Image (spheres, rainbow, N blue to C red):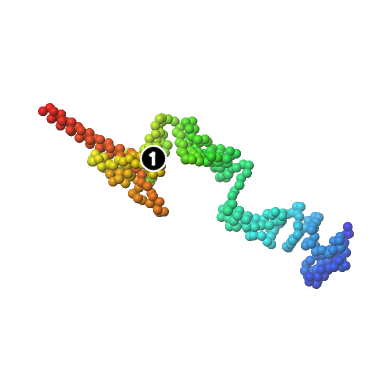
Amino acid sequence: MANTIITKNSITASAVPTSGQLVQGELAVNVTDKRLFTENSAGTVVEVGTNPSTIAVVGNATVGGTLGVTGLATLASSTLTANPTLSGGTANGVTYLNGSKVLTSGSALTFDGTNLGIGTSSPGAKLDLSNGALRLSSFYQVQWFSGATQLGSILADSGSNITFQTGSSNTERARITSSGSLLVGAASLPSASVKGSAFLGDANQGRLYVSADNTGARDLAYWINPNGVVGTITTTGSATAYNTSSDYRLKNTITPMTGALAKVAALKPVTYKWNADGSNGEGFIAHELAEIVSGCVTGEKDAVDADGNPRYQGIDTSFLVATLTAAIQEQQALITSLTARITALEGN
């Protein structure tokens, strides 16, 4: 290889040397356009950096200005001492190799220095996934940490169950089974030996399971409103009680019930058939019962919702017990009085 590079210069703008003006090994410089030319092995004049398919630099190359590459540039080992700039692409777009292995950027993947966006050019969180799905393969777990301390995780196992875990020991607290059941505090459906709660995922019906840890009295359900607990479901060793709050500390102006026998006489028990299936029934008509013992009935007669659909009334006949008890007492008082009178008459 020659130790001397022969150059030829031109100050004419846009001037390009011909093959007759160059021989292989010589360089032609257009100092006005700042363009460099040479002749390849086929005798064709090419512009260095534009037409060649490959330019090899042996050793170090320093570019103090702008390096424009419109062809292929291969860097076997490189160090950038300043931030490179792409002339194309999207602002905040993350650069990547596309299907043709070309470095590019777009709005599908953006990073603004703080937030990473996938499918959005304006990420609003550390990771902002828009109009897409997050897919996990092999190890299907999402974990939450505070520093180095694990707070909890969600795990999808090979049996298509999803478990919810807390703490650094991954203690399971709940799971959704592959059949659609929701288990809380249990890894299988609650039973006499498995404690916890579950909503059964069944194609035909929903079902609630609740299991206590022993046969003593256990409140398995609480009904609460702004006034506090207003009802419970309690189990013992062999029975279940459906309780309405009735503690004396919740009441005032307590007086004996009167007129109960007259109320019972006014009740209108009926027999009927259900519209849904034609089956027989017996009981009361809600609005008729409400006129006598209003506490037994919920809802209003002929009520409808905002769409015009019926909002049916309901009855809880357990609220008749106090009235029936008082009526029996009044009736017994009458019987006792009449018996005394009959005895007195017979004694005469």
Vertical order, 262 against 77 (above or below) = above
Residue 149 at least partly seen: no
Vertical order, 219 against 78 (above or below) = above
Identify which residue, 287 or 282, lies in the foreground: 282
Task: Please state if 222 lies on the left or on the right of 29 as rendered.
Answer: left
* Residue farthest toward the front in the current orientation of the protein: 278
Residue 12 at least partly seen: yes
**Could you tell me which residue is drawn at 76 percent across and 55 percent down?**
74
**Could you tell me which residue is drawn at 15 percent across and 32 percent down?**
341
* Residue farthest toward the left in the current orientation of the protein: 348
**Could you tell me which residue is drawn at 85 percent across and 61 percent down?**
40
- Which residue is tagged 1? 279
Task: Please state if 127 lies on the left or on the right of 247 as rendered.
Answer: right
Q: Where residue 220 sits: x, y (%)?
A: 42, 37
* SS under mark 1: loop
Task: Please state if 324 lies on the left or on the right of 203 as rendered.
Answer: left
Quarter in which the N terminus is drawn: bottom right
Q: Specify the quadrant of the image occupied by residue 316.
A: top left
Task: Please state if 41 lies on the left or on the right of 291 as rendered.
Answer: right
Identify which residue, 29 or 205, lies in the foreground: 205
Q: Where residue 255 sits: x, y (%)?
A: 25, 40
**Could you tell me which residue is drawn at 63 percent across and 42 percent down?**
138
Q: Amino acid at mark 1?
A: Ser
Q: Where residue 46 sits: x, y (%)?
A: 82, 63
Identify which residue, 179 or 85, lies in the foreground: 179
Quarter in which the C terminus is drawn: top left
Vertical order, 308 against 316 (above or below) = below
